[in-house]
Image (cartoon, rainbow, N blue to C red):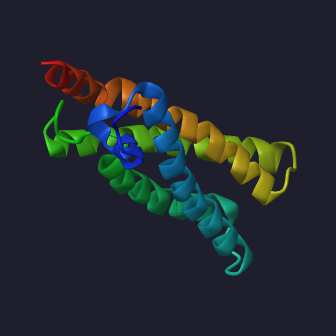
Amino acid sequence: MEGRALGALVYRQIQSLPVSFYTYFVVGGLAAIVDIGGFMLLTGAFGIPWFWAALASFVVSAAVNYLLSIRFVFESGVRFRRHHEMALVLLVSVIGLGFNEAALWLMIAGVDLGRLPAKVIATGVVFLWNYSARQRFIFRAARARVRRRDAA
């Protein structure tokens, strides 16, 4: 850390896996606030059934997550062309949506857990899926390439 400004840790080019994970944790936390807040608003204030509310809030939070992730966590457009990358992120998000809906169904309909605790748990499961899938399958080459370039 000597000689580096504290703000330099934010730059994707020098992030190690742990820093990348913690940065994604902040980004994912912001997206989770959008997801959980939207879910509670839609189910509570508007009376929308939990399945549809979860779908709508998840879609909005996935867009927020992607935009913040390519800005602060991952380097976009290095391994794949931007439209291929977006398609892969969409695929990861759709799988995450399936995990989200299945976890909510299990906890709300199966165990009769309240909406808020069920959504918080489902969001945690999807967070782990999203980070690992994006880091491993979509943006992995970007990190490796940046390290090689910086080492030269």
Of residues 78 and 16, the one nearer the viewer is 16
Q: Is residue 120 left or right of residue 18?
A: right
Rendered view: 113 above or below 131: below
**Residue furthest front as drawn:** 3
Disc tally is: 0
Of residues 119 and 151, the one nearer the viewer is 151
Splitting the image into 4 quarters, where does residue 93 fall?
top left
Q: Is residue 48 visible?
A: no
Q: Position of residue 83 (x, y in %)?
A: 17, 46
At x 26%, y 45%, the residue is: 86
Of residues 107 and 145, the one nearer the viewer is 145
Q: Position of residue 8 (x, y in %)?
A: 34, 44
Q: Position of residue 144 (x, y in %)?
A: 25, 21
Q: Is residue 150 left or right of residue 24?
A: left
Splitting the image into 4 quarters, where does residue 25 fall?
top right
Of residues 132 and 73, the one nearer the viewer is 73
At x 46%, y 58%, the residue is: 59
At x 58%, y 55%, the residue is: 32
At x 87%, y 50%, the residue is: 112
Q: Is residue 31 visible?
A: yes
Q: Is residue 122 left or right of residue 4?
A: right
Q: Quadrant of the N terminus?
A: top left
**Residue furthest bottom as drawn:** 45
Rendered view: 66 above or below 20: below
Splitting the image into 4 quarters, where does residue 94 fall?
top left
Q: Quadrant of the C terminus?
A: top left
Q: Position of residue 108 (x, y in %)?
A: 79, 50
